[in-house]
Structure formats: structure tokens, C-alpha cells
Image (spheres, rainbow, N blue to C red):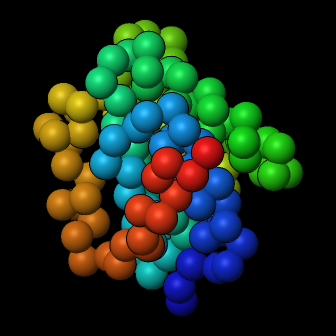
């Protein structure tokens, strides 16, 4: 099973919102063959905790406009070094650069295909 067209559309909305807030290293990983509860991971980085918050807020706002409800969100209470939001068909990880390097989610999911979203950078 591969990610649905709807989940890919949602991931692209999230990726574009992240790029709009100057997120770096935005990737989308298709985990649908490995995980039964979601299709895609969207992973983005921010240089500061303030930027991580801004990226996640923008993603939340744009997905809400697209009719996608957030099921839960974690990580904003403290220093916001890794914020995770679950939208059902996609799970968004926005990490501070240091956490991104340390946890290396792309390496953990290296056997899963990535969906290219580089065309969204600088769209607006």
C-alpha cells in the first residue's frame, strides 16, 4: 500500500507552509507500508525554538484551511525543540536543528520512499 493522493496533498500543504516560514531540510517520507496508522511523515527543521513554533503554527493554520483537523500536538509546552502534530493521514515533525541531527529520522526511515517537495520552496 502506498500513500493516498489525499495524504500526499495534505503533506504538500504542510511542506509549503513550512517553507513559507523558512524551514530547512523539509522532507516527506512515505511510511504507509511500515505503519498502519498514518501514510506520511513531514519533517522540517528550524534554527530556533521560536522558529519551530512559527513553522508548526503555520502548518496547523494551512492544514486547517484545507479542512484537515489536528488530532493531537506535543512539544510546544517546553522549549519547543521537537514538536509533533498528528493529522491522521500525516504526522508532522518540526525539530530544532540539533534534535534533527541527533535523532536523524530520515536514517530511521531510510528504507521508505520520499516524496519530492523541493518544488514548493519559495512558492509564495
Instruction: Residue at 45%, 81% (x, y): give it.
Output: 33
In terms of image quadrants, where is residue 81?
top left
Write the residue at 18% across / 60% down: 107
Residue 105: horizontal and vertical position, in percent? Answer: 26, 52
Nearest the eye: 7 or 58: 58
Coordinates of residue 120 in the picture (x, y in percent): 52, 58
Q: Is residue 23 visible?
A: yes
Residue 72 position (above or below residue 63): above
Q: In which quarter of the image is the C terminus?
A: top right
Q: Residue farthest to the top?
A: 78
Residue occupying the point 49% across, 48% down: 122
Check the image and name the residue furthest to the left: 102
Tell me where residue 2 appears, x and y as whole percent. Answer: 53, 85
At horizontal 44% and vertical 14% (from top left) the residue drawn is 50
Q: Is residue 22 above or below residue 89?
A: above
Q: From the image, which quarter does the N terminus lie in?
A: bottom right
User: In screen coordinates, is 99 left or right of 10?
Assistant: left
Nearer to me, 28 or 78: 28
Does 14 sit above or below residue 56? Answer: below
Where's residue 71, x and y in %? 70, 42
- Examine the rendering and report whether any part of residue 80 can be seen: no
Amino acid at each position: 500500500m502506498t500513500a493516498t493522493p489525499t495524504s500526499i496533498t495534505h503533506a504538500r500543504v504542510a511542506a509549503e507552509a513550512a517553507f513559507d516560514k523558512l524551514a530547512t531540510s523539509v522532507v516527506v517520507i512515505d511510511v504507509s507500508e511500515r505503519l498502519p496508522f498514518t501514510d506520511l511523515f513531514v519533517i522540517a527543521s528550524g534554527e530556533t525554538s521560536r522558529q519551530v513554533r512559527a513553522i508548526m503554527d503555520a502548518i496547523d493554520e494551512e492544514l486547517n484551511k484545507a479542512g484537515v483537523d489536528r488530532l493531537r500536538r506535543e512539544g510546544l509546552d517546553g522549549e519547543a525543540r521537537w514538536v509533533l502534530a498528528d493529522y491522521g493521514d500525516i504526522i508532522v515533525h518540526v525539530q530544532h536543528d540539533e534534535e534533527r541531527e541527533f535523532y536523524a529520522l530520515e536514517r530511521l526511515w531510510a528504507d521508505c520512499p520520499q516524496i519530492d517537495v523541493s518544488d514548493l520552496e519559495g512558492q509564495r
